[in-house]
Amino acid sequence: MTTTVQPPVAAGTSSSAAAGGRGPGPRRDRAITIAAARPWLLLTPALIVLAVLLLWPLIRVVLFSFQEYGLRQIVSGETNFTGLDNYIEALSNPQLWSVVLPNTVIFAVASVVCTVVLGTLVAILMTNLGVFWRTVVGSAIMVAWAMPAVTGTYVWVWIFDADNGIVNQLLMGAGLMDEPFNWFTNRWTFYLIVLINVVHHGFPFVAITVMAGLLGVSKEMLEAAALDGAGAVRRFFQIIFPSLKQVFSVVIILSTIWDFKVFGQVYLMPGGSGTNRSVLNLGVWSYVESFGQNRYGFGSAIAVLLTLVLLVITIIYIRVLMKEDEL
């Protein structure tokens, strides 16, 4: 029987180092540190650009919101910090609670619901079409999505124009109206046109996103449910919606953010630039106070409040979804 004699291990040398010479040491620790830092090093240029373009302007807006900042401060370069005065003035303004906030919240809720529902219906329609007609419908709705918001707004203004608008002409021709109606002076009809404009521009994103998710839903499961007698509505809420919960979360959160801070579709409408105070929302009110009244500090405070509202809504919605996933 042959006995193998192991060579003695030198004093101060670990067993792992003696086995292969690859034990923990300064060189190995340095390699691990470099490997962990490499992704951040690669992201550094993009993070710097984002910080310059997004983070720094946001910080400046927050700083302005604590100041009385107008034309004199712009010219002189002086700073006049007033603490929370701008926020107190905004929150104590009756117009915020009676006009601006209801316009913003009610419109955003209605717009998100209509956009998601219409986009989902169009997505279901497209999944049931052949390749040719799916391409035709997809191309048609992408035209609406590609249209700039400014162009789309002016098109809808022309359609509802009080003098030469198609809607007034059709209603008078059908005998439903005796004289032209100005759709832009009334608060509710004004936002009805804005709602049509925003939904028309936003539903293609929801349709394409939801359709991409629908193509991944198990057809065997849907066919089995249909054979068991489940109708289309039941199949949607018991099979499709749970399978696409993350997809709907994304489109709802993005639609909420976009519709809460809608600006151009309101500002470019007749009376939406501030002449009709009953149709102001948070975005337009901030712009009017900043550039119309030269109260940049007060306008910045309104913009910060709008950002905080969006953050609260997004955080609450994400927490609800996470709790549902845990269950």
Image: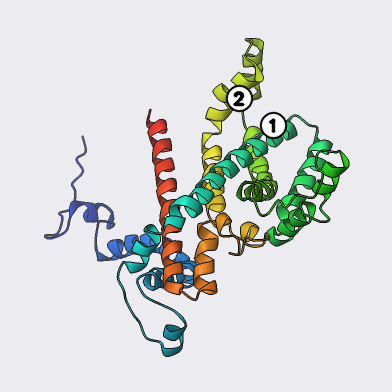
Q: Position of residue 251 (x, y in %)?
A: 57, 43
Q: Is residue 147 visible?
A: no
Q: Are marks 1 and 2 in contact (CB under 8 Å)?
A: yes
The correct choice, above or below, for 105 with respect to 95 in the image is above
Q: Which residue is mark 1?
A: 124
Q: Residue at x 80, y 42 (%)?
A: 177
Q: Residue at x 46, y 68 (%)?
A: 299
Q: Is residue 109 left or right of residue 202?
A: left
Q: Residue at x 62, y 15 (%)?
A: 225
Q: Residue 302 falls in which quadrant of the image?
A: bottom left
Q: Secondary structure at mark 1?
A: helix
Residue lying at 75% horizontally and 29% vertically, measured from the top left: 128
Residue 189 image offset from top left, x and y in percent: 66, 47
N-term mark: 1 or 2: 1
Look at the image and tell me in which quarter the C terminus lies: top left
Front in this rendered view, residue 295 or 2? 295
Q: Which residue is mark 2?
A: 236
Taking the image as shown, residue 15 lies to the left or right of residue 78, namely: left
Q: Decide which of 19, 33 is in the foreground and name it.
A: 33
Please say if 178 is above or below 216: below
Label 2, residues with CA under 10 Å away: few <14, some 14-19, many ≥20? some
Circle 1 packing at 10 Å, graded few (<14), some (14-19), many (20+), is: some
Tell me: residue 326, above or below residue 285: above
Relative horizontal placement of residue 40, taking residue 285 as reference (left or right) = left
Q: Residue furthest left?
A: 11
- Return the x and y of residue 7 as percentages of the image width and height: 18, 53
Which percent across, then down, holds residue 1?
A: 21, 34
On screen, residue 27 versus residue 232, left or right, reads left
Label 1 to label 2: alpha-carbon separation = 10 Å
